[in-house]
Amino acid sequence: MTETSSPKKLILYVAGQTPKSLAAIANLRKITEEHMAGQYEVEVIDLRQNPRLAKEHSIVAIPTLVRELPVPIRKIIGDLSDVEKVLVALKVQDE
Amino acid sequence: MDSPLGIAKSPTGIEGFDDLTLGGVPSGRPTLVCGSAGCGKTLFATTFLVHGARDYGEPGVFVTFEERPVDIVANVASLGFDVSGLIDRDLLAMEHIAIDPSEMAEIGDFDLEGIFLRLELAIDAIGAKRVVLDTIESLFSAFTNQGVLRAEIRRLFDWLKDKGMTTVITAERGDGTLTRQGLEEYVSDCVILLDHRVHNQISTRRMRIVKYRGTAHGTNEYPFLIDRDGFSVLPVSSLGLDHKVFEERVPSGVADLDAMLVGGGFHRGSSILVSGVAGSGKSSLSASFVHAAAARGERAIYFSFEEAPGQIVRNMSSIGLDFKPYVDSGLIRFISARPTFYSLEMHLALMLREVQKFDPQLVVLDPISAFMESGGQLEVQSMLLRMVDFLKTRGVSSMFTHLMHGQESGMATDVGLSSLMDGWILMLNREANGEFNRELYLLKARGMAHSNQVREFVMSSSGIRLLPPYLGETGALTGSARRFEEAKTRRAEVARLADVERNKAMIETRRRKAKAQIEALQAELDADDLELDMVSKAATEYLRQAATDAHEMDVSRSGGDRSRLK
């Protein structure tokens, strides 16, 4: 999961096609396309398909967005409905 | 563990708890275990889970929100729980749900489906029937949206119930509420409160079943214990007067004492109080009972609150009681604990547990007066009452020693115990003529005639003897006074015997003298007789001669010539 190639990786953990999950996916797509195109590569993992990963990555809340690099690891939980906050949470380390 | 009308229950394997709840925690439902920090919630939960996996064929999932799994495994390993082994055999699973709030931001709506997924995976992987959530409240510090959290926790409990999981949820005690986050609102089936109280600098753990829907249960506070055997609840209140009664007599190991009781010893199952001042031989007498029991092949426990086991064994060898073989062969157990180690309840609970485990025929508590320091009189009395009831219900003979502080007012024991006791042996240590002498007497022996004498209690390397008192002109005497008085009598006897001998000899001499005199007189008499005989003979001869002479004279006169003719 942890690629160090130039587009940094964001992993979004969802569980099935719940409204919250779908909203989170849509919100994340929008944010990455509109505000940081090319910087991040997004992977969506459906834990319902692969629940083992929930333990491996210690996911508690759904949906969870994980940015493993650069360290420290950042986790954002929720449907990412507040764009400004998501940007702050992701960028705070870059500045 | 189904009861015919009530709800199904799952045994926890926690000693005492299953009896108290008539079966355990409700099957397939959540049970809330709450209590303040360090009162044993996690251990309760772990014991429930490990016993389920190991003994009842119900695999379990341990969900820890606080401690790391390795720590939990290490913590309970000291109690003999091989958690790693159970994990390897797929009987147990650990799920560590750790959340670091510092690396997390909350943006928008969310749920805790992750926990559900992980739990479901773990449950399905081992076919779990039991789940522990320890301590789910720590989630409240990780998430800011408490509304979501509460809804999710409620959903989790419902979900576990739907899956038929027997669940134990631990929670911190709150201020004025059972749990800090009001979890009791979500768990309506069974709520257990653990408490850790310190009174007089002695801590006691207590447990109370606050709520248990659909079943009868004990409502009192029960002390519980965490030691090397794990978690055990000790129900000590449910005892009554349903005692076993025996006709059989139990020798005390002191033959002289048995002889004082008509029938030879106390009844089996008697409770005997031995009270006395310091150094009057209470422990020695008790030890003698224990030794005699072991010699008969019975088991005995000696609870000492003052001496260490090694010291008792050493000291008792001085009166010819060798405990070592019996201790080695497991007939006798010495258990020493300072009264201040635990609270009274805990002492009682521990003793009851030891008695249950060891199943002895004789129990000694030496001395019960030691408890007076750690509790009020009423508490001590109630504790001993329960101990006596418990032992008598099991038909166990018991001895309680009690240290009296003065023997003048010694008829009443501090703890007002005498009415609980079937036998009461009073031991005194009296000063007279510059020495202390031990005395023993039987103040009370229910259901048997007994001697009213005060005996002198003598300990030597050949054991304990009770000497009958010396009853002389000056009253009952003991010790040197007795020996002196006895010696005096012996000397008087010797003198008297000598007197008789002397008199006898004197009379004999007089008799011999008299006899000699008699002989002398007899000799004189004989001589006189002889003389008399001779005198009379001479007289006869004279008369005869005279007659002859006269005749001759006659003859010569009438024919005088004849003679001259011749």
Image (cartoon, helix red, strand yellow):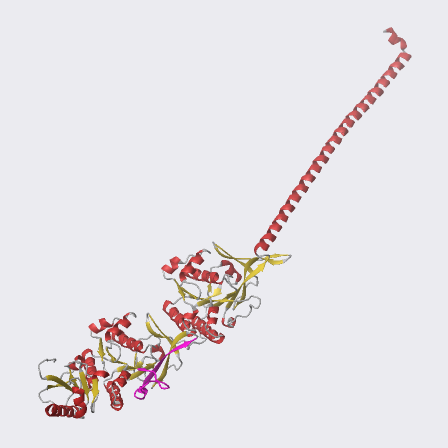
Residue drawn 80% across the image and 26% down it: B532
Query: Compared to B115, does B400 lie above or below?
Result: above
- Pick the front one: A21 or B539: A21
Residue at (39, 58) in percent of width and height: B324
Instruction: From the top left corner, tell me how far across and down residue A88 is, in percent.
Output: 18, 89
Question: Vertical placement of B129 versus B518: above or below?
Answer: below
Q: Is residue B188 visible?
A: no
Q: Is residue B176 magenta?
A: yes
Instruction: Provide residue B29's location: percent of width, then percent of height.
Output: 28, 84
> Residue visible at 66% across and 44% down?
B500
Q: Quadrant of the C terminus of chain B?
A: top right
State which quadrant residue A43 falls in.
bottom left
Q: Nearer the viewer, residue B201 or B51?
A: B201
Residue B513 locus on image (x, y percent): 71, 35
Of residues B525 and B114, the one drawn nearer to the viewer in this rendering: B114
Residue B419 position in % (x across, y down): 51, 72
Instruction: Please state the total of marks drawn on the protein image.
Output: 0
The answer to whether any part of residue B141 appears in the image is yes
Q: Is residue A87 magenta?
A: no
Q: Quadrant of the N terminus of chain B?
A: bottom left
The magenta span reads: B171-199
Q: In this rendering, would B254 be left or right of B60?
A: right
Give the left or right position of residue A62, taking residue B48 as reference: left
B208 vs A25, left or right, is right
